[in-house]
Image: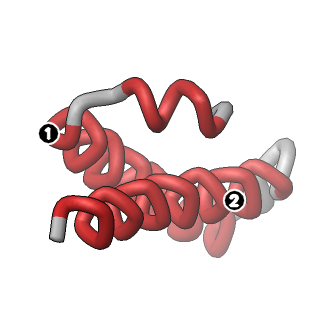
Amino acid sequence: MKVQVLTDMPENELHDLLVKEREKLIKMKMSHAVSPLENPLEIKFTRKVIARVLTELSNRRITSK
């Protein structure tokens, strides 16, 4: 997900995206533990998306103060 897309999103959508991506990560980790995923790099990509969303939320909190 591009940074520009995240900066254009409203804050409530960012929170929803964060929840959705965290649930997706948990499910992928669980299924990978049982049987290997077809593409295990998806776990890495999902973690990076979560980090980008958290960074954007943090930046918004800092600039709003």
| Picture quadrant where residue 26 is located | bottom left
Which sits in the foreground, 6 or 26?
A: 6
Residue 18, compared with residue 34, is above or below; it is: above
Of 35 and 20, nearer the camera is 20
- Label 1: few (<14), some or many (≥20) within 10 Å? few
Looking at the rendered image, the quarter that the C terminus falls into is bottom left
Residue 52 in the image: x percent, y percent?
A: 56, 56
User: Is disc 2 placed on a helix, strand or loop?
Assistant: helix
| Residue 34, position as x, y percentages in the image | 63, 69
- Can residue 27 be seen in the rendering of this structure? no
Kind of residue sitting beneath label 2: Ile
- Residue type, numbered disc 1: Asn
Which numbered disc, 1 or 2, marks the residue that appears first in the sequence?
Answer: 1
Q: What percent of the width, then of the height, locates residue 20?
A: 32, 45
* Above-or-below relation of 12 to 54: above
Q: Residue at x 79, y 60 (%)?
A: 36
Is 13 left or right of 33, judged from the image as shown?
A: left
Left or right of residue 5: residue 48: right
Q: Is residue 12 above or below residue 21?
A: above
CB under 8 Å between discs 1 and 2 = no
Residue 36 visible in rendering? yes
Of residues 23 and 10, the one nearer the viewer is 10
Q: Mark 2 points at which residue?
A: 43
Q: Name the residue under label 1.
A: 12
Quarter of the view holding residue 1: top right
Q: Which of marks 1 and 2 is in front?
A: 1
Name the side, left or right, on which 60 lies relative to 47. Answer: left
Residue 49: x, y in percent?
A: 59, 51
- Residue, x 84% and y 55% (percent of image)? 41
Q: How crowded is mark 2: few (under 14 residues within 10 Å), some or many (20 or more)?
A: some
